[in-house]
């Protein structure tokens, strides 16, 4: 049975939601395996436009079971609101299952995320403020509370008591803020437990009984350059965004993963702080932002926009092991007379072609550009690769060479059908 990971290859927001929504039509399971409601997956399909944060983008396909895997941090309040919103618009969420091992985002995580950001002042990470960092820190510190625990009321009471005492000491003594009420959190999360109980279970047995033709999609969140190990640390998120996290965060062992689809935008964007060598703080950057409406799905913040970064793209492909790539938002460049690709960096007077581990080095990197002529005609209605203008084909082939990986899909608009299938994903 094919198990395919769909991975953001840049700093997130590459358009994974659209790709997963499209591929989910043929999938038996779609599994979110990392991140939390910091993710914002925009999906436009026959039912309308949706912004998903926690629920896998396969929820619109009636035959697909959607799984929130053990690697995700779940804010139950956000999840229930998202489920209600979908239900109100006629989308059935009864096929959702939540791993009993998924960690929960608690009210103190959200509070601490925002207090920590204030403390970082000029060096703020620019987090989404959703409590993601503190929740994954607690997971590692063994102070986390998992989804399976809120359906065991007595066990939950005992753990919350110990953890909240500790969190309140931090809130009061370090930040000088008011402590949180045990009773309120206990009542609220016990209630969440009651409502979510039918959805919470061991999800690691997904492959049992799957037919050989049934597909599993592992839906990535954020992007490889926000990965805490390989991204622009400390300006990263707090759970792994790489393909290798797909098996760990879902419970599907790594030798079952048969394909890794890397999703690249044909330019770069980034939200929040941290280095971005090709960022354009000029009219061209504004044109990309306004043409593509590059504003955060989760926070509404304007995204930083820039040219395609080949150094970062090659690095990302290598650490993920992409077997195919998808290129999104090609149509955004339809009117551009020339395009640029960053082929190397100038660092302290030397030309380098690798992605430095140190952010201070990356902050000093100046992009070296190759100029490429634009195609200056609309690609929005093109559905066959051979019908793309020659210059557009030359541009995407260049990107495929950089990623050292064959192209499977090219997106020329937000709608499901605004997609060119160059070759199958496997
Ligand atoms: P956090 O994940 O909320 O802690 O934020 C850490 C960094 O990751 C910040 O720069 C965020 O803007 C960025 N980030 C988190 N989730 C996403 C996403 O889904 N798309 C793009 N950037 C994200």
Image: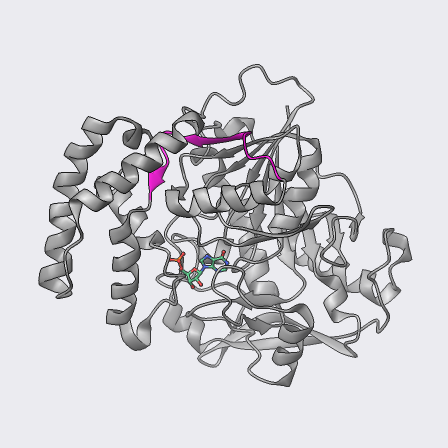
Residue 26 image-quadrant placement: top right
379 vs 48, nearest the viewer: 48
Ligand 1's quadrant: bottom left
x and y percentages locating residue 334 in the rendered image: 79, 70
The way the protein has been coloured in the rendering is one colour
x and y percentages locating residue 184 in the rendered image: 22, 46
413 vs 93, nearest the viewer: 93
What residue sits 74% from the left and 46% below the top?
A: 46
Label tally: 0
Furthest-front residue in this view? 88
Furthest-bottom residue in this view? 283
For residue 188, above or below residue 271: above
Residue 3 shown in magenta: no
- 365 to the left or right of 263: left
For residue 394, above or below residue 151: below
x and y percentages locating residue 222 in the rendered image: 50, 53
Considering the image in quadrants, where does the N terminus appear? top right
Considering the image in quadrants, where does the C terminus appear? top right
Furthest-right residue in this view? 387
For residue 124, above or below residue 50: below
Q: Which residues are magenta?
A: 91-104
x and y percentages locating residue 317 in the rendered image: 58, 51
Residue 387 image-quadrant placement: bottom right
- 219 to the left or right of 287: left
Furthest-top residue in this view? 209
* Residue 35 showing in the rendered view: no
What residue sits 56% from the left and 76% below the top?
A: 367
82 vs 281, nearest the viewer: 82
* Residue 305 showing in the rendered view: yes
């Amino acid at each position: 049975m094919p198990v395919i990971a769909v991975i953001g290859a840049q700093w997130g927001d590459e358009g994974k939601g659209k790709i997963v929504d499209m591929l989910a039509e043929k999938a038996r399971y779609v599994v979110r395996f990392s991140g939390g409601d910091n993710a914002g997956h925009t999906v436009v399909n026959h039912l309308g436009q949706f912004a998903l944060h926690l629920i896998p983008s396969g929820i619109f396909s009636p035959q697909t079971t959607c799984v929130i895997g053990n690697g995700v941090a779940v804010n139950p309040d956000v999840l229930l609101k998202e489920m209600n919103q979908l239900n109100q618009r006629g989308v059935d969420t009864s096929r959702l299952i939540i791993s009993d091992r998924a960690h929960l985002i608690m009210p103190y995580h959200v509070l601490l995320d925002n207090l920590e950001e204030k403390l970082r002042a000029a060096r703020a990470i620019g987090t989404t403020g959703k409590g993601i960092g503190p929740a994954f820190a607690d997971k590692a510190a063994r102070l986390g509370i998992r989804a399976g625990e809120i359906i065991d009321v007595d066990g939950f009471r005992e753990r919350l008591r110990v953890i909240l005492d500790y969190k309140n000491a931090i809130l009061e003594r370090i930040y000088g803020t008011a402590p949180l009420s045990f009773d309120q959190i206990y009542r609220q999360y016990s209630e969440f437990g009651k409502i979510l109980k039918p959805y919470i279970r061991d999800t690691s047995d997904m492959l049992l009984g799957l037919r050989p033709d049934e597909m599993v999609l592992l839906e990535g969140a954020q992007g490889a350059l926000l990965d805490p190990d390989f991204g622009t640390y400390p300006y990263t998120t707090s759970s792994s965004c790489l393909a290798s996290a797909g098996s760990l965060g879902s419970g599907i062992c790594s030798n079952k993963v048969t394909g890794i689809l890397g999703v690249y935008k044909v330019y770069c964007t980034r939200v929040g702080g941290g280095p971005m060598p090709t960022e354009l703080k000029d009219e061209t950057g504004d044109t990309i932002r306004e043409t593509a409406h590059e504003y955060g799905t989760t926070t509404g913040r304007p995204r930083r926009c820039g040219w395609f970064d080949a150094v970062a793209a090659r690095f990302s492909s290598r650490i993920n092991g992409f077997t195919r790539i998808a290129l999104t938002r090609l149509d955004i460049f339809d009117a551009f007379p020339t395009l640029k690709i960053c082929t190397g960096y100038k660092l302290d007077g030397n030309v380098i072609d690798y992605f430095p581990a140190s952010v201070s080095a990356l902050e000093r990197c100046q992009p070296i550009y190759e100029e490429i002529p634009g195609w200056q005609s609309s690609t929005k209605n093109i559905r066959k690769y051979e019908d793309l203008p020659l210059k557009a084909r030359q541009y995407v082939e260049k990107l495929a060479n950089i990623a050292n990986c064959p192209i499977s899909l090219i997106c020329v608009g937000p709608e499901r059908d605004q997609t060119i299938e160059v070759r199958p994903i496997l």
